[in-house]
Amino acid sequence: MTSDSVRPEITDLILRVALRDRVAFDRLYAATSAKLFGTCLRILKDRAEAEDVVQEVFIGIWLKADRFAVTGQSPMSWLIAIARNRAIDRLRMRRGVLTALDDDAIEVRDPTPGPEAQAVAAGERRALDGCLDELEAGRADAVRAAYLDGDSYADLAARHAVPLNTMRTWLRRSLMRLKECLQR
Amino acid sequence: MSDADMDHEPDGDDILAAEFALGVLSDDEQAALARRVETDAPFARLVAEWEERLSPLSEGFLPADLPPAIKRALDLRLFGAAQARPWFWSSLALWRGLAGAATLAFVLAMALPVFRPAVPSDRLAASLTAEGSSVTYLVLYDSATGSVSLAHMSGDPVEGRDFQLWIARGAEAPVSLGVIPAGVSTRVPVTSDQIRALMTTAAHMAISLEPPGGSPTGQPTGPVLAVGDLLDI
């Protein structure tokens, strides 16, 4: 798991939140809300919606903090997973209403991920980047688009102009190759 | 999307966990697997492993500041207007919801040893449960503050009886930490050196049902409502 220095503090705060410690909840919010809001914002690309979803994320954290210890995850990965899941749920709900994909919104991306080093140890990022580089270019992009923008198989298939099951086969193989590569 | 062939391969659950963690499946499939995560611990573990594996990608999520009004709105949604009440009364509805978390406390007790970090820790936790008893507590001990926090997860007080908290090492006689308010979350200061010395992973904690004011003998006399090993966290 991660060896970053934030881990003990955030872990401690989550465990205290599990014991309904409001002060710990406030501190956890102060320490992580910008990152989790950034997560929602990137996926939803709508500030008002992301502001609403990030509140749902923290409600979920308050209610589910007692499960954190069970997962064996590093704290930021656990928190970001909650934020991603909520944001993707909202994204799908919205798309269900709109039905069509908004291609313009997908193009509006920050081209350069900044030096946000807090959440992840640099070594782990390098390892994953290295393994993504071993995949064919389009497939690494698909993994990144799914993770960062909440693209579904249907979205990815449409963008790459391939049948959905083809996209699924590609991505499944890519994910398994990633796992093998990371275990080397 | 039916992919039965793939799901029957040995790696079926693992790849399904990867797809679920990534969030690429259809709405129906995502929802079905979200329910599975709640009940299927091995599958939940696979999902957690994939979330961890993919987490370096989260560097692409740039932090963005939130207006202070959002935190106020959040507090209002979570805790209502009654901010001044003691923390453990903050939401009755929430506590009702948590009663259902008793099984989770059990899961926690089962799963913690698996994930026990090798690093030494000055913090210990225990999940107190017992077969045939609905009383469940989550215990956190912090040597820095020298106090035991008890989160009441489920189980009602018994009229005319008190809950008493104990610690014991192996088969040694239990030592009392005193009577605790039944059926609510609370904090118990650890002032005795004897008890502080007992606070290690070699010990377990328990709650017994006692006459009002606590056991008259200095040893548990009533049934043990909940018990659990102290674990490093």
Image: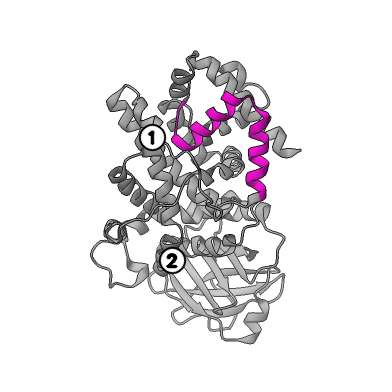
Q: Residues within 10 Å of mark 1 (few under 14, many from 20)?
A: few
Residue A143 occupies quadrant: top right
| Image location (x, y in percent) of residue A165 | 52, 15
- On the image, numbered disc 2 is attached to which residue? A27
Residue A47, percent from left and from top: 31, 45
Q: Quadrant of residue A41?
A: top left
Q: What kind of secondary structure does the magenta stretch mostly adopt?
A: helix
Of circles 1 and 2, the one toward us is: 1
Q: Chain of mark 2?
A: A
Q: Which residue is mark 1?
A: A108
Q: Secondary structure at mark 2?
A: helix
Point out the residue furthest to the front here: A112
Q: Image quadrant for the C terminus of chain A? A: top right
For the point 54% across and 68% down, the residue is: B140
Q: Which of marks 2 and 1 precedes in the sequence?
A: 2
Write the residue at 40% across / 63% down.
Answer: B156
Q: In the picture shown, does residue A175 fall above or below B216?
A: above
Front residue of this view, candidates A103 and B142: A103
Q: How much space separates mark 1 and mark 2, taking CA atoms?
A: 32 Å
